[in-house]
Image: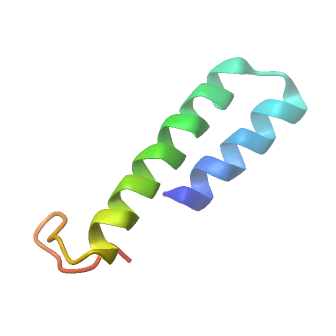
Amino acid sequence: MIILGVILLVIGLVAGISILWTIGIVLVAIGLVLWILGAVGHAVGGRRHYW
C-alpha cells in the first residue's frame, strides 16, 4: 500500500493531476499506520503482521 501510494504521488506530481496526489498521500498514511501497528505487535485484520 505504501509503494502504491508513492507511485501515485510521483505520477500525480509529474502529470500535475491533483487527485492522484491526494489519493497517494492517503494511501501512504494508511500504509504507515498499518505498518506501525503490525510492527508493535497489534493484530491488523486478523494477522499478527501487516507485511
The image quadrant of residue 47 is bottom left
- 14 lies left or right of 44: right
- What kind of colouring is applied to the model shown? rainbow
Front-most of 33 and 16? 33
Q: Is residue 15 above or below residue 31?
A: above
- How many marks the image carries: the answer is 0
Looking at the picture, does residue 45 appear above or below residue 12? below
Q: Furthest-front residue in view?
A: 40
Q: Quadrant of residue 17?
A: top right
Q: Is residue 34 above or below residue 16?
A: below
Measured as percent of width and height from the top left, residue 32 is found at: 45, 56
Side (left or right) of 2 relative to 33: right
- What residue is shown at x 59% (from left), y 54% (from top)? 4
- Residue under the image location 61 percent in, 60 percent down: 3
Q: Horizontal and vertical percent for residue 1?
A: 48, 57
Compared with residue 27, is residue 32 higher up or lower down, i.e. above or below? Answer: below
Q: In this orientation, which residue lies closer to the viewer: 49 or 3?
A: 49
Q: Quadrant of the C terminus?
A: bottom left
Residue 2, horizontal then vertical, whole percent: 54, 58
Q: Position of residue 44 (x, y in %)?
A: 19, 65
Residue positioned 76% across, 32% down in the render:
12
